[in-house]
Image (spheres, coloured by chain):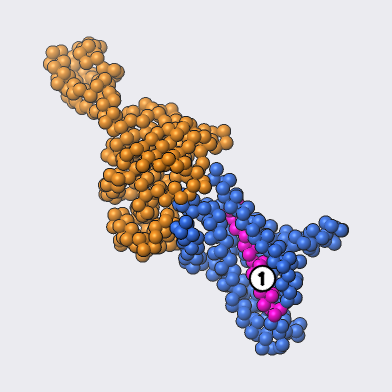
Chain colours: A orange, B blue
Amino acid sequence: MSLKVEGITKLFGDTKAVDNVSFEIDKPSVVGFLGPNGAGKTTTMRIITGFLSPTGGKVVIDGETVDANNYGLRSRIGYLPESNPLYTELEVHEYLKFTGQLAGLPPRKTNERLDYVVERCGLREVLYEPIYRLSKGYKQRVGLAQAIIHDPKILILDEPSSGLDPNQVIGIRQLISELATEKFVVLSTHILSEVQALCTRVLIINKGRLVLDATSDELQHSGTGSVAVLIKAAGEADAAASAFQDALQPRKLTLDREGELISLHLAIEDSNDVREKIFDICVANGFKILGLSSSGSDLEKIFRELTVGSDETGQQ
Amino acid sequence: MKQDNNSLSVLLKKEILISVKTPAAYVVIIVFLLISGYMFADGLFLSNVATLRPFFTLTGILFLFFIPALTMRSFSEEFRNGTLEVLVTHPVSRGKLVLAKLLSSYLIVVASLVPTIFYFIVVASLGNIDGGAALAGYIGLLFLAAGYVSAGVFASSLTQNQVAAFITALFILFIFFILDKVTALTTGNVAYILQYASSDFHLASFYKGAIDLRDVVYFCAVTAFFSSLTSKWLELKFK
């Protein structure tokens, strides 16, 4: 099993929505797809599922190229589109049976699978309700159930947790994590904590280009940790700054002074714990520590660094 | 490819389920039956001839409005709700998608014609009706409906706006309807071609009780033309 995205490019008129994006997934895992609005996440996912054809490049699943005519390949993909379109007139069980059988489930297996997804997605109590009567959270779960009912090996989930309340979000994440033990899951999201909670690999896309492809471990040790210190010092702020500068060699140091209070922000090169050193510096210089906090890898910061200045209202 | 053969019936089942659950189809059928019933009863005793021909002619005209009203939803609604994304990302060919849409709309048209058999019974009870001509007339209407439905589904595949789909379909059908009425303005071969391309011209012999292979071919060709046009158009649209 493998999913290969080979240099896909998509043009809408003159706009490059996706620009030469490549990546490969070769083992069951959750890959998080991150990017500002209009960066090309949805377009990339639509190309993987065969809904759109790429202008250049190709998507290869198990050695077969995804295209409009190779529709047999689609039974191996489960897809939850961003807007989660549903036939709202149908009842939940009718809709799920329909999509399951359309994906190629034989009729005798359909009920068994329906039972499974209804259980896993918590749809038991709304099974015979028409979809238009459901809340957004239930609708989202129907969409997810639709994506997994035919037991596909590849799951493409475009913002799976949108519209869910915090408890439901945890439930869905748990489900996705369990599915990922045997499936390739690609999910897009705006919620950075979701990526940290779920994904073993992170792809960040900006203005159609892939700007980061890293495992979660690599991100944890990517050297973008930071320490914030609030001290009370009688002397010059510069003296305090240089004391920290000399002792810790931070990548970046910012300083804010308000009366006797100095707050310092240090971006440090590695993930070593510098809190003890900071204590020593303060003792040696007679600073009084009022606050000290350190954060390891900060995905939010990486995200901002890589995508800042991007247009907020682009082509989806 | 057993699994793929199945997809047409799965799609068709869904179309029918949705039609049954939404009021749109019922409203259209009821309006059709009310108008055709009123017109039928209104002219029944005037002609003093036991024939369904006025009913067939009238129905041919009603189809110009009735069929676009039935087909306007078919693809437009899928576009507007985004559900086409669900369909297209499942293992089913564009041809099957189009065929399911055609068949489901067609079935509704057929269903709406079934109650009109009552008109036949009424006329038959009043006089000596030509049963063969009536049967041929119905067959003619079924062929006409196939052509009109395929044009209506095509119009619906052009836009996500149902009103626009309705007007486009009405426009296309009206052209087919009007062609043999403007032949007086032309001469020779042009007049002949216009006449041959018009739907009414081919219906005439059905109403007289004759099933001519040329007329059958004409309606089949129109149906095939719009069906494949829809299928091709969908392929282009999602390039």
Q: Position of B78 compared to A128: left or right?
A: right
Residue A76 at x, y percent in the picture: 40, 48
Magenta stretch mostly in which secondary structure?
helix
Residue B156 at x, y percent in the picture: 59, 55
Q: Quadrant of residue A31?
A: top left
- Does residue A131 appear anywhere in the picture? no
What residue do we see at 49% from left, 59% from top? B5
Q: Quadrant of residue A202?
A: top left
**Residue A158, above or below B163:** above
What residue do we see at 29% from left, 29% from top? A219
Residue wearing tag 1: B141
Q: Position of A103 compared to B230: left or right?
A: left
Q: Could you classify mark 1 by the number of other residues whose Cα lies within 10 Å: few (under 14), some (14-19), or many (20 or more)?
A: many
**Residue A114, above or below A3:** below
Label 1 chain ID: B
Q: Which residues are magenta?
A: B132-158
Most foreground residue, B167 or A244: B167
Residue A205 at x, y percent in the picture: 41, 33
Most foreground residue, A205 or B97: B97
Q: Position of A21 compared to B158: left or right?
A: left
Residue A136 at x, y percent in the picture: 37, 53
What residue do we see at 29% from left, 33% from top? A216
Most foreground residue, B79 or A238: B79
Most foreground residue, A45 or A308: A45
Q: Amino acid at mark 1?
A: Leu
**Residue B69, above or below B36:** above
